[in-house]
Image (cartoon, grey):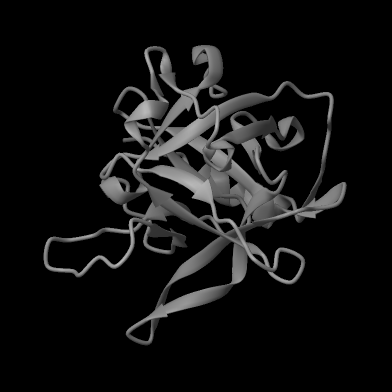
Amino acid sequence: MELKLIFLLMLIQGFNSYKLNESDAQIECAIFNNLKKDHLFAENLVFESFQDRDVYTREIPIKYLLNNGIYFKEHKEGLWIFEPAKSLGKNIFLLRNKKYDEYLYADDSESSLFASKTRREVHTKKIKLSIDKAYVWAILKTSQSGVFKIVNMKYGEMLEGEDISKNKIQLSSKRDCWTSKILDADDKLTNWYLFCHNNALPVS
């Protein structure tokens, strides 16, 4: 499987920020985790003015399934606008949530798991015209048709969905998301499907 991680690291070192270009073509997609078939969505907040929005995955209700893929007419928090960052290279995007008009980013803070820092939290929030590369994502093809890796351009870390094992008590239908420092090309938790409006994939 070719992920071109060396190429990504070169890009990460070469750019610190990116300026939005509203003239670029944009494609609307739902993003599904390969292992659990859950879609990526931005959480509703009670105090939206005081905190960044959390991002999770969860199963999609059957009534939102359409013949030509996935399209949420009422579940817009699960739709993402792929805005190309053409000046940074091919298949590199900002991901804007359709419902909240906020951008997905990797936090500079890290989540600890048994005192071992291996993960970084992801959130959404509104941004200005000039942004940090924590908001920029590379969409990389894998050897599996229709399966992609989503890599943060600032940290070089893959977007990953939470693994809910049979032995773990699940108190919520939501599953956590983060970027992982462990770059395992064969890890199914870092595999993602894109189901886009009119079947128009943003990745060439």
Residue 62, image x and y in percent? 33, 30
Q: Residue at x 72, y 35 (%)?
A: 85
Nearest to the observer: residue 166 or residue 118: 166
**200 to 64, vertically: above or below:** above
Q: Is residue 90 left or right of residue 195?
A: right
Q: Image quadrant for the N terminus?
A: top left
Report if residue 158 is visible in the image. Answer: yes
Q: Quadrant of residue 148?
A: top left
Instruction: Please state if 125 lies on the left or on the right of 159 as rendered.
Output: right
Q: Quadrant of residue 155?
A: bottom right
Position of 22 relative to 123 (above/below): above
Say which quadrant the C terminus sits in.
top right
- Residue 146 location, quadrant: top left
Q: Horizontally, is 96 left or right of 72 in the view?
A: right
Q: Residue at x 49, y 14 (%)?
A: 199
Residue 124's place in the image compared with 150, above or below, is below
The residue positioned 12% from the left and 61% from the top of the image is: 166
Toward the left, the furthest residue is 167
Residue 204 is at least partly visible in this image? no
Comparing 185 with 40, the one in front is: 40
Of residues 147 and 195, the one drawn nearer to the viewer in this rendering: 195
Going by the picture, which residue comes out furthest to the right? 129
Marks counted in the figure total: 0
| Residue 3 image offset from top left, x and y in percent | 42, 39
Q: Residue at x 77, y 66 (%)?
A: 49
Instruction: Give coordinates of residue 39: x percent, y percent.
Output: 41, 41
